[in-house]
Image (spheres, rainbow, N blue to C red):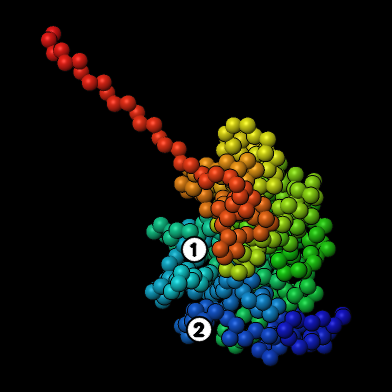
Amino acid sequence: MTKRDIPGSKTVRMEDNPSFRRPPDEPVVLRRAEHPISRRDIDHDALKVLNRLHRLGFTAYLCGGAVRDLMLGRTPKDFDIVTDARPGQIRKRFANAFLIGRRFRLAHVRFQGGKVIEVATFRKTPLPPADNGCENAVDSPESSESPASAEAPSSPGPPAAPDIYGTPREDAFRRDVTINALFYNIADFSVIDYVGGLEDIAGRRIRVIGDPGERFAEDPVRVWRVVRHAARIGFDIDEATALAIPGFRPLLTGCSGARLYEELNKDLKTAFPPVFDALRNWGLLRYVLGKAGEAYEADSALFARLRALLAVAAREAAAGRPFSLEEMHALLFQPWLEPRVTGAAGDVVAVLNEALMEAQTGATIPRTMRAGAVQILSIAAALHRALRTGRMRASLRNRAHFQPAARLCFLFEKSRLPEDGESFDRLFAEVRPSAPRPVRRRRRRKPGPKPPDGNTDP
């Protein structure tokens, strides 16, 4: 076997390092000196939870993407914990813990500033089918911890059946990809690998745990997650996993639109262009965005316009100025909707709503979200017409979505967002220096009731 490097660590020669030679069913364990993870890089509040669980006699591991990112020298976005403590035990021992979920209960340990450290109990695999939005889907950490099941505290009721709980090994094997199934043990600061994730990190590849066909058939959303993981961290997709994707991506149509909407929002919040490149290259956009996705896959120029908008949004998010989800949904459909708006005669809002309904998106965009995006695009279209004609309606400024629409209109016109001191008014004055100032229309007063004629005789 060739020499491979674990990023941030000393060179590891697989055939020479006894840590990688293990009996069947035994994990690979890297001691503290053999991996790059330092407690200094772990969130302070996550360390509090880990250490307290350990002091109370429970097994407590940092898990998932946090361990993967720390092994790669990246800053994790979230610090999730897995333990053998049951949800009720966690709530009893942490005054700031709240249980969420119905079928599979999780503990959210809350800290100042709105920070939440999620703590789950080791679970078994396989599990009975869960109602997580796909016909054949089974529970996985990514699916069961979605916002749909985790936003509000669960209603009081009997605890989940004890047979859902398992061992660390069982918990590792129920995860989606190998690089997300690593554990960091706070007891001895070691990294534990049951599924070959360390080798895949060294080989820079994304590999599904188990048979890809079986895992994709269980939960087709795993296809999306595999593509996303590879794009986000720049890894290749394992050959067997890649070969299975084309045959199983149509199963996304069997997943609930609400669940696909949640997955879409994960990508919109970061607006990371390589993820959308990968979704297009693997032919997934059509199953998520319907006819709009088909157009983006078929028309390179159209997708290039979308990608340019996403690149601006990604820069803003990296600078701590993220767009709202309404703005992101407006950006997502704007290149596809633009020809319809340009040629629209009459009510632009009605045209936009009709087009989005005809798109038949796989992701079900909630009515309020769709209405907000439509308002932003309709106002932006009115501002665009004002720049072309020199006639600006003052009433537009009173619309609730005027500011985001003005910002996006500036982006559409200049291919960038306004800087300090810039605004749509300044852009309008620059493009139409001789245009009259917007005039507010006076409302006509309705005539009052006619006075009586003064004759009161019957």
**Measured along the vertical axis of the image, is residue 137 above or below residue 33?**
above
Residue 246 circle label = none
Q: Secondary structure at mark 1?
A: loop
Disc 2 marks which amino acid?
Answer: Asn
User: What residue is at 68 percent from the left and 85 percent from the top?
Assistant: 36
Relative image position of residue 313 (x, y in whole percent): 64, 60
How many callouts does the rendering have?
Answer: 2
Q: Position of residue 293 (x, y in %)?
A: 72, 46
Q: Residues within 10 Å of mark 2 (few under 14, many from 20)?
A: some
Quarter holding the C terminus is: top left
Q: To which residue does mark 2 refer? A: 51
Q: Is residue 74 left or right of residue 81?
A: right
Q: Nearer the viewer, residue 435 or 176?
A: 435
Give me the C-alpha separation between circle 2 and circle 1.
22 Å
- Specify whether residue 140 is in view: no
Percent x, y of residue 47: 52, 81
Does residue 242 appear left or right of residue 109 in this picture? right
Residue picked out by circle 1 = 105
Q: Identify which amino acid the numbered label 1 is placed on.
A: Arg
Q: Classify mark 1: residues with Cα within 10 Å, few (<14), some (14-19) or many (20+).
A: many
